[in-house]
Image (spheres, rainbow, N blue to C red):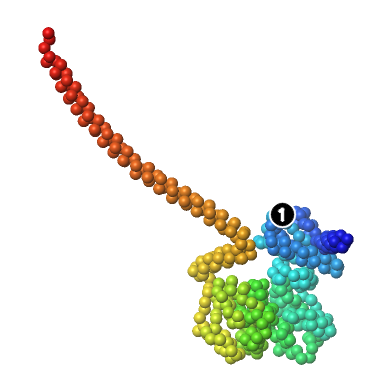
Amino acid sequence: MGAARGGRRSLLWAAVTAVILVVDASYVHDLDDSFKENRKDDIWLVDFYAPWCGHCYTLEPVWNEVGKEMGGTGSPVKVGKMDATSYSSIASEFGVRGYPTIKLLKGDLAYNYRGPRTKEDIVEFANRVAGPIIRPLPSQQMFDHVQKRNRVFFLYVGGESPLKEKYIEVASELIVYTYFFSATEEVLPEHITLPEMPAVLVFKDATYFVYDEYEDGDLSSWISRERFQGYLNVDGFTLYELGDTGKLVAIAIIDDKNTSTDHTRLKLIVQDVARNYRDHFNRNFQFGHMDGNEYINSLLMDDVKIPSIVVLNTSNQQYFLPHKPIESTEDMVQFINEILEGTAEAQGGDGILQRIRRIIYDAKSTVGSVFKSSPLLGCFLFGLPLGVISIMCYGICTADTDGGSDEAEMPKRETGRDLTDEGTEEEQEEESGESHVEYTDVAETPLL
């Protein structure tokens, strides 16, 4: 009786789960070749996927949640998905090169999403890009609200000017990463002072910084550098995006779950340098920490100890390791200055030898991961081809040996045949002689 009730309960939960999945998926439109002509009147958030892609399969439930969130809140953004293998011409037109690819299509513009594949991050991206490129802040209350909700945002203060035109141009390109606002000087809190008007500011790390064309260079480059907080929790996605800044990335490799003095001290040292030495190092360095060494090991093709400090140059794949343990802020500052002065030893790089090493390392890592996750599958994938190749090699070697033996026996047979022929001729001569003698004897016998 209890077993029957348990079975019915399991079936009920399964049915409820299936209904929820169907409801979530109903907010996501399956797109076909008609999408190209019908999309221009709406804003679309599209997942270009391939049926055989494992990452696409992992994204599917998240994508259904995104569709439910956008549809349930009345967002103007429509959520869809397209099989890029069935409609490859449309996917190619939108610049799809891998799977899954997430794009927000707004008029003639297509914005790529390159952040973490979570519902919250994708929804935030869609709402940001779908709205106005420059959002006005009409009051100080609105300014305070924006400052509480955003860790990093940019603000233009002033009227019409060439700087504003440049600001709008840069914002239209970088809206995929952060928010851009505009306001009058009256909207700003009293503690914010501007050296001149108009001005562009970035608000982050509980403070603000003003763009200076003479010191900071091109506005687009400055915004690309400043769109990150001074100190970050670095992961693979973040490190990839940091490559656009042109900065070196100083990372404390630690275990977040380890509360020992060594781990916490190293993290605090890097935070201290990021906060108190910003004026010295912000233009050239980004600071942060990374939980665990698995990713950094694969990047450097080496076994990095935990805890430790690594400085990465994402532009040429070089990295720097301190020649002595980092025990204090002064040690870290000295290490960074050595890198700037060119006295620190650079390792890695993107030369030919490093590329060959990368190929070998990736091959070993792939084989190792397959055997680690599924030994039987590893034996089948790598053992079967090796077995076939071994049999082929054995067959080739055996065939050569047999052929050589046959060829070696041939002269012997021919030689034997010659000797036999010669012997036969001598015997024939002897037989001929005997026959001649016998014939002569018979001829000399007198007739009676």
Look at 54% across and 83% down and name the residue there.
322
Q: Taking 322 as reference, is 187 left or right? A: right
Whether residue 348 is visible here, answered yes or no, is yes
Look at 21% across and 25% down and name the residue there.
431
Look at 73% across and 86% down and name the residue there.
206
Question: Label 1, on which residue?
Answer: 87
Quarter of the image with the C terminus is top left
**Residue 397 % position (x, y):** 43, 50
Q: Taking 304 as reference, is 118 left or right? A: right
Q: Nearer the viewer, residue 320 or 316?
A: 320
Compared with 38, 272 (above or below) is below
**Residue 348 % position (x, y):** 53, 74
Quarter of the image with the N terminus is bottom right
Compared with 189, 224 (above or below) is above
Whether residue 315 is visible here, answered yes or no, is no
Q: Quarter-wise, where is residue 268 in the image?
A: bottom right
